[in-house]
Image: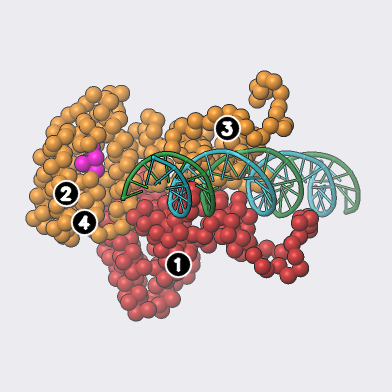
Chain colours: A red, B orange, C green, D cyan
Amino acid sequence: MRDDSTGGDPKQPPVNPTRKPRGTGRRLNGAVAHKLGLAILAGEYAPGDILSGEIAFAEELEVSRSAYREAVQVLTAKGLVESRTKTGTRVLPRSRWNLLDPDVLAWAFAGEPDVDFVRNLFELRAIVEPAAAALAAERRDKVDLKVMKDALAEMRRHTVSTELGRAADRDFHTAILQATRNDALLTLSASIGAAVNLTTEFKQRGRTLPRNALPDHLRVYEAIAAGDANEASQAMRVLVDLALDDTRAAMSRG
Amino acid sequence: MRDDSTGGDPKQPPVNPTRKPRGTGRRLNGAVAHKLGLAILAGEYAPGDILSGEIAFAEELEVSRSAYREAVQVLTAKGLVESRTKTGTRVLPRSRWNLLDPDVLAWAFAGEPDVDFVRNLFELRAIVEPAAAALAAERRDKVDLKVMKDALAEMRRHTVSTELGRAADRDFHTAILQATRNDALLTLSASIGAAVNLTTEFKQRGRTLPRNALPDHLRVYEAIAAGDANEASQAMRVLVDLALDDTRAAMSRG
DNA sequence: TCGATTTATTTGTCGGACTATATACGCAAT
DNA sequence: ATTGCGTATATAGTCCGACAAATAAATCGA
């Protein structure tokens, strides 16, 4: 209450009250969901906390209740909050969060990512990606191999310190996942991959820029091309472990 | 279209126009999201298809546009659809779906699940769960072991053909995941576990009721209790493979 | 003291009006 | 005939205001 200087405006809807820049290309509700998601993942709202009522919060964010509600539905869909009448909207315990949802992962890595969580994620990668490489070695066809080879060439041309280089790295891993012929695997690693990209970027600003990972990538490729599942698995394992080492070093230094 | 017998009702809001049973305990928008999600996963709307406009579809479903929109936001959050002005709301390609989202998985398994997808999921289980068992063997504490033991006792008391027995089975697996101290792993397997439950139920109506899986479970438990990561991994691998065999048999028969 | 009832608060649902934006169309200039 | 630009139009996006439903909390009665 008590705010707008010159009284209310009960009859003046048409004009353009306030210019709303809407930060990114997102729609309004998406922007609100983004903002709330970031806040929750950053711990500004802890599990168990109850958000201010719809009317109040919507007003605070300067959006309509409809837009705010749609944003909350998104968060609900991702397991972050739960709304009940009379009680309000409360943040759910972390165990109910869809931690593997791409958006949730992005929100988690937007700020300073939780060290334990990063470790967990790499642990998962260390489990999944070597197995994926093994499957790829058994199922890849010529097209898969060509995509991988091209990605490696790109990686050689640009280093991982450039965006193009990182994109090529991503392409290489995606090609491997693609070769497994397993959608679930692909979805999972795509999610984790997105997070890992952010980790890499994060690592970058720690000025590390350590080893040249290309030989290790090449070893993975050779094994997959040769159809050697065991070797592919081991080579990929090395790759993930190295990435973890680098990331851990960068994080402990920061 | 063209249905409402005796014309419109432009001035009769207050009473109780139509008794809406709202199938389950869900809220209206949740019910709509559920319905649409099922339809999409069942292939009634194929990737690339465009849903009827908001006003039309909301009317068809007999809900307000707000409720319909909130439902669409949920589907958008799960990567199933994308809305753009002037174009409409279109079903995204399968590669964009969050296949590991618990709701999406549930929708996928609500009807006759796609055989290939089931295979993919079991493949993922076969990768993740043995590794999880190995981690559990290294990190479990006394509490973890007690929970597992209790679950096994429950499984012995009731068989897997009863709901209580299946619940105990779930508890056992959850306890293992819990013991890995890895939230990402837990989230992932919780999702898959839900799907597997449905698969088990599906398998059940195929009148299979095959082997007694308890000895295999016991072997996993013993290995974890003994801290033998290798043995735990192998034992769990056997468990997953057996489950896949049973499910595959039931599905090819149906 | 305990249970039934009322109250109050909060989300849920609705309808309608207006805005923003992207596509499609048509007209004109070249 | 082709190109370019402006306009028309269809669709999602946003907002508002009111009422319904649910339920935690307070109140009342036995």
- In the displayed structure, does residue B192 sit left or right of residue A13? left
Residue contact at pointers 3 and 2, CB within 8 angstroms:
no
Q: Chain of mark 1?
A: A
Give whichever of discs 3 and 2 has the lower sequence position.
3
What amino acid does circle 2 point to?
Met
Crowd rating for badge 2 (residues with CA inside 10 Å; few <14, some 14–19, many 20+): many
Q: Chain of mark 3?
A: B
- The residue carrying mark 2 is B148
Residue contact at pointers 3 and 4, CB within 8 angstroms:
no
What amino acid does circle 1 point to?
Glu
Marks 1/4 same chain: no
- In the displayed structure, does residue A215 sit left or right of residue B133? right
Task: Please identify the quarter of the rendering in which residue A113 is found.
Answer: bottom left
- The residue carrying mark 3 is B61
The percent coordinates of residue B69 (x first, y second) are: 58, 43
- In the displayed structure, does residue A229 sit left or right of residue A106? left
Q: Nearer the viewer, mark 3 or mark 4?
A: 3
Disc 2 from disc 4: Cα separation: 10 Å
* Residue B179 marker: 4
Instruction: Examine the residues drawn in magenta and state their main secondary structure.
Output: helix
Please say if A9 is above or below A183: below
The percent coordinates of residue A174 (x first, y second) are: 40, 54
Disc 3 from disc 4: Cα separation: 45 Å
Q: Which residues are magenta?
A: B166-170
Residue occupying the point 30% across, 61% down? A120
Task: Please identify the quarter of the rendering in which residue A202 is found.
Answer: bottom left
Secondary element type, mark 4: helix
Disc 1 from disc 3: Cα separation: 38 Å
Residue contact at pointers 2 and 4, CB within 8 angstroms:
yes
Residue occupying the point 22% across, 36% down? B164
The percent coordinates of residue B3 (x first, y second) are: 65, 22
